[in-house]
């Protein structure tokens, strides 16, 4: 039986299969085909290579992971996902956002029961696609509806989040790093950089684990400024820590910073308290990564002299005597100058005119002679033997591999000039297609020759489990892509099943210790806020354009807010009647926090961004709102509450006298709820009278308890008021109403009948 949705999808697939996929490659650099399970998109503007899995959701890993025949999606969805990749790749989104959109579409096509056209909002929601799934999936559903291969759906996730103030505080706590983890980072930094002096030089005979140094430096920079760790730090330019001061004032420290998310480049300020360790860390990478930068300059233009490539960098005295700085180096003599080999290192070179193809394996070794690496010439021929054990093998030793991947071809020998050409081509195509640029995990990029963190694969991947998935990525001649640096650093800060050990475990700390990299950005914002820095300054410092976003990064909890109120109030000297007014005015003036004065206390909601929509059944409209704070000893608020309590009690009494109470379900429900809330109001009044002046009082409706913050000790006390059961009170009222004589049930009606000369018995 024909189906219009499947028929349209078949026609759509046929149309797209005829398109020339010039921007896509399959595994191994082959031309992309609709039957491939892995595609690579090559950005035509910058050469950036993005990997897309086209098979079932749940297959993870690099390289060929996800390319197994069992990973394929069923037809026609194995082709629909490729159509969506083509469509998404041509948008202006970031590479990560594109991969997220494709990933959620793959997840949907993997998990759906039946065909896509048969799905509804309910069936998609039942798949539990995860947080943020709706925003990422809607463009795919809209595309499918536009092409007529499914019905239009308005898919939205149901928001089941707990939005009470207590839930908000719990969420805030999760975004801030553990203080223990921050302290541990300081201790680890001292160990890692113990043998590094202030100029960045390592003490003779000592060694620094460069991956550990990267993790600590990234974390230190994130503590010193509220940056985006994986999007901004990897693309820092080569520089030393700068400082500036006016009129002999305190210096302001900064680094030239490449912005992200549309925020421009700037001189980003860093906390002066961290200037000393920052100087040491920045200077270390300034010096240590220079070999990588020199190598990148060579890859961009191999026709430069050694002196021009070095750019003023010193070569070891023992090495320098064997080199001519005025000559153009080849790949391996440059490696010798950069210290990749020992002073008198040799490799086998084919004798001029010899043809190894005419000899068997045993005799081939006699055709090669040992030649110092520093004297290798471009016309010298080396064996392409991939195994380092043979006598005539050179490339495994030169590239630092015991078993070399097959990337140079099938010839027996090649000249060094040809090996150099093929290696640079391979590096720029397979390891870093966007070269000379390199990108962070965001959209920021920098030329690798100018990058602060220009790290060689042989340094970076040493000791890392599961690293170096690409051929020769761990070579001393491969510079690590900057995005890989950011991802690797973040993985060692947070305990996961994919990481053998975190930086904390490596230095003897608990396996449970860790921190989310973005939490340091929240931490810096909060510290700045507690230091009374205006929100406009924090916004600019954090690289944001909208200062309203800054409030989501400021996590001054009850204790901090109470501490400010405590300093502002000073109970012994301040007139109690003005406590609330002074608290609010000074809170806004000194902290730039969203705070508003109410008739009964302070409102902590930013009313400029989110207008109040809270309603209750009391005269005091803010009572029981999760965003409101009451202040102990606030006589004006207490007086207002007492009047409201009297009025609400009379309302309860009037309902108990109403004859409709016996039959009206709505009136009974109202009475039960209002009876409980009136007693909560009574308890609040008692706490405001009995608590020390200035105590911050909040009520949680979900937990049924008050939170009292003592301004002297900064301790929070939980108080659960004892409330009578409203259901029992309701039953007693009804019982008393039923027991009354019928004649007394409605005195107003009896009075009305009497005015007409009638009695209730005559009705």
Image (cartoon, rainbow, N blue to C red):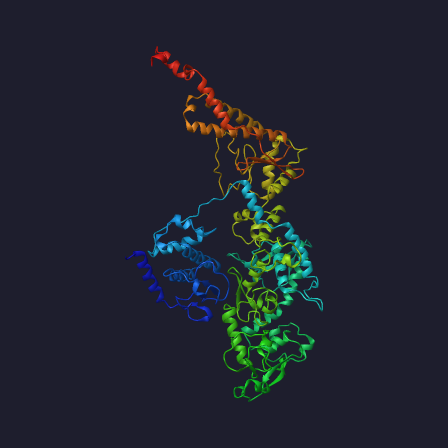
In the figure, residue 679 lies in which quadrant?
top right
**Closer to the camera, 306 or 462?**
462
Residue farthest top in this picture: 757
| Above or below: residue 527 compared with residue 110 | above
The answer to whether one can see residue 305 in this image is: no
In the rendered image, the quadrant that contains the N terminus is bottom left
282 relative position to 115: left or right: right
Place of residue 549 in the rendered image (x, y in percent of width and height, measured from the top left): 52, 49
Place of residue 160 in the rendered image (x, y in percent of width and height, measured from the top left): 47, 44
Place of residue 377 in the rendered image (x, y in percent of width and height, measured from the top left): 59, 82
Q: Residue at x 37, y 54 (%)?
A: 114
**Closer to the camera, 137 or 359?**
359
553 relative position to 313: left or right: left
738 relative position to 392: left or right: left
In the figure, residue 289 lies in which quadrant?
bottom right
Residue farthest left in this picture: 1
Place of residue 547 in the rendered image (x, y in percent of width and height, measured from the top left): 53, 48
In the rendered image, the quadrant that contains the C terminus is top left
**Number of marks present in the image shown:** 0
In the figure, residue 346 lies in which quadrant?
bottom right
The answer to whether one can see residue 157 in this image is: yes
């Amino acid at each position: 039986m024909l189906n219009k949705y499947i028929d349209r999808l078949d026609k759509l697939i046929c149309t797209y299969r005829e398109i020339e996929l010039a921007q896509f490659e399959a595994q191994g650099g082959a031309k992309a085909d609709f039957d491939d399970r892995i595609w690579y998109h090559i950005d035509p503007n910058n050469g950036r290579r993005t990997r897309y899995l086209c098979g079932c959701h749940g297959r993870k890993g690099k390289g060929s992971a996800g390319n197994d025949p069992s990973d394929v999606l069923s037809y026609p969805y194995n082709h629909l996902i490729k159509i969506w990749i083509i469509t998404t790749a041509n948008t202006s989104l970031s590479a990560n956002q594109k991969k997220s959109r494709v990933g959620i579409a793959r997840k949907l096509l993997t998990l759906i029961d039946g065909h896509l056209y048969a799905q509804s909002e309910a069936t998609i929601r039942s798949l539990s696609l995860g947080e943020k799934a709706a925003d990422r999936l809607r463009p795919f559903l809209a595309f499918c509806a536009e092409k007529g291969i499914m019905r239009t759906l308005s898919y939205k996730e149901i928001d089941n989040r707990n939005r009470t103030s207590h839930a908000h505080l719990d969420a805030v706590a999760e975004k801030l790093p553990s203080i223990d983890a921050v302290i541990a980072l300081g201790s680890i930094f001292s160990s890692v950089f113990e043998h590094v002096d202030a100029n960045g030089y390592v003490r003779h005979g000592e060694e620094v684990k460069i991956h550990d140094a990267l993790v600590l430096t990234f974390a230190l920079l994130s503590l010193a400024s509220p940056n985006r760790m994986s999007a901004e730090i990897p693309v820092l330019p080569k520089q030393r820590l700068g400082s500036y001061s006016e009129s002999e004032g305190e210096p302001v420290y900064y680094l030239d910073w490449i912005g992200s998310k549309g925020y421009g480049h700037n001189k980003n300020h860093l906390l002066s308290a961290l200037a000393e360790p920052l100087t040491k860390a920045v200077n270390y990478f300034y010096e240590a990564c220079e070999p990588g930068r020199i190598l990148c300059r060579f890859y961009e233009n191999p026709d430069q002299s050694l002196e021009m490539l070095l750019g003023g960098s010193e070569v070891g005295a023992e090495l320098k005597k064997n080199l001519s700085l005025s000559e153009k180096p080849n790949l391996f003599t440059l490696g010798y100058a950069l210290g990749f080999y020992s002073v008198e290192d040799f490799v086998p070179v084919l004798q001029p005119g010899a043809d190894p193809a005419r000899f068997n394996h045993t005799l081939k070794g006699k055709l090669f002679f040992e030649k110092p690496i520093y004297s290798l010439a471009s016309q010298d021929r080396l064996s392409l033997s991939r195994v380092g054990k043979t006598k005539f093998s050179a490339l495994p030793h030169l590239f630092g591999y015991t078993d070399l991947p097959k990337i140079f071809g099938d010839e027996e020998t090649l000249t060094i000039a040809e090996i150099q050409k093929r290696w640079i081509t391979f590096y720029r195509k397979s390891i870093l297609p966007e070269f000379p640029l390199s990108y962070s995990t965001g959209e920021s990029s920098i030329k690798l020759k100018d990058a602060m963190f220009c790290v060689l694969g042989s340094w970076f991947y040493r000791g890392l489990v599961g690293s170096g998935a690409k051929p020769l990525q761990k070579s001393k001649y491969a510079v690590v892509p900057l995005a890989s640096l950011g991802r690797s650093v973040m993985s060692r800060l947070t305990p996961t099943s994919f990481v053998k050990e975190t930086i904390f475990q490596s230095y003897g700390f608990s396996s449970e210790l860790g921190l989310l990299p973005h939490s340091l950005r929240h931490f810096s914002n909060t510290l700045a806020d507690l230091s009374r820095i205006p929100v406009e300054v924090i916004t600019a410092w954090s690289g944001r354009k909208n200062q309203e976003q800054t409030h989501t990064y400021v996590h001054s909890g009850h204790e901090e807010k109470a501490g400010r109120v405590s300093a502002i109030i000073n109970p012994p000297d301040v007139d109690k009647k003005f406590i609330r007014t002074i608290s609010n005015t000074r809170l806004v003036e000194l902290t730039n926090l969203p705070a508003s004065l109410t008739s009964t206390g302070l409102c902590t909601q930013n009313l400029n961004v989110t207008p109040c929509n809270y309603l209750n059944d009391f005269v005091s409209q803010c009572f029981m709102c999760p965003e409101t704070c009451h202040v102990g000893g606030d006589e004006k608020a207490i007086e207002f509450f007492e009047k409201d309590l009297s009025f609400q009690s009379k309302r309860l009494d009037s309902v108990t006298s109403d004859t409709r109470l016996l039959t009206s379900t709505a009136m009974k429900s109202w009475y039960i709820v209002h009876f409980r809330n009136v007693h909560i109001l009574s308890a609040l009044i008692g706490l405001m009278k009995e608590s020390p002046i200035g105590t911050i009082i909040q009520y949680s409706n979900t937990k049924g308890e008050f939170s009292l913050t003592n301004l002297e000790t900064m301790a929070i006390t939980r108080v659960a008021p004892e409330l009578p059961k409203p259901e029992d009170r309701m039953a007693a009222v009804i019982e008393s109403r039923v027991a009354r004589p019928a004649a007394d049930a409605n005195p107003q009606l009896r009075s009305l009948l009497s005015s007409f000369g009638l009695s209730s018995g005559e009705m």
